[in-house]
Image (cartoon, rainbow, N blue to C red):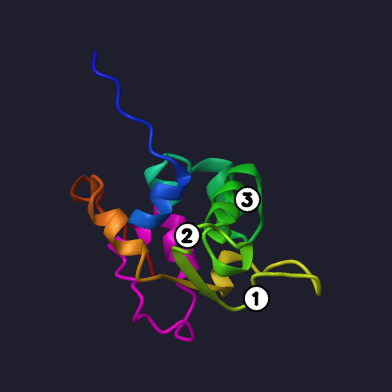
Amino acid sequence: MKEEPTVSARDLLLMAAAVHKLGPDTNLGYGPSTVKVMRQALHWAGLLHGEIKTCFESYEECPPITEFYEGLFSMMPQSKPAEVLFEGGGNWGGPWGPRASAHFTSCRLTERGPPRVTARNQRTREPIISN
């Protein structure tokens, strides 16, 4: 039996942003896009069900949600990564206090984000319906 390759949370987040067309021209002030990216990535990872889904939809954090949210933040300028792949809008936290839930922040890919995603197996990843 052929084993499916494991895809990292980082790659799932990049692919989710690309599928939802959250590129460099996306207006960060126009609604909470982070929830779309997080919901999609968690769904593809097979984690968006049961207790984790309840936790996510009620703006709480639990280990899988925290891992994905921190993974997204680690690709933003505030984290000083070697390569900035995401930009964010809203309250991403800092010395003044904790970050807001993904439901209340926005994100988009930078110019460097999309090429990595399009080289991946994106065509087999269908977006879930989100409102």
Dot 3: within a 10 Å radius of its alpha carbon, few (fewer than 14), some, or many (20 or more) residues?
few
Q: Which SS class for mark 2? A: loop
Task: Give the extent of the magenta segment.
Answer: 16-40
Q: Which residue is mark 2?
A: 83
Q: Which dot, 3 or 2, sits closer to the camera?
A: 2
Percent x, y of residue 115: 27, 60
Q: Residue furthest top?
A: 1
Quadrant housing the C terminus: bottom left
Quadrant housing the N terminus: top left
Q: Earlier in the sequence, mark 2 or mark 1?
A: 2
Percent x, y of residue 97: 79, 70
Label 2 vs label 1: CA separation? Answer: 22 Å
Q: Is residue 48 visible?
A: no
Image-based side of 123 in relation to 75, left or right = left
Q: Which mark is residue 66?
A: 3
Q: Which SS class for mark 1? A: loop
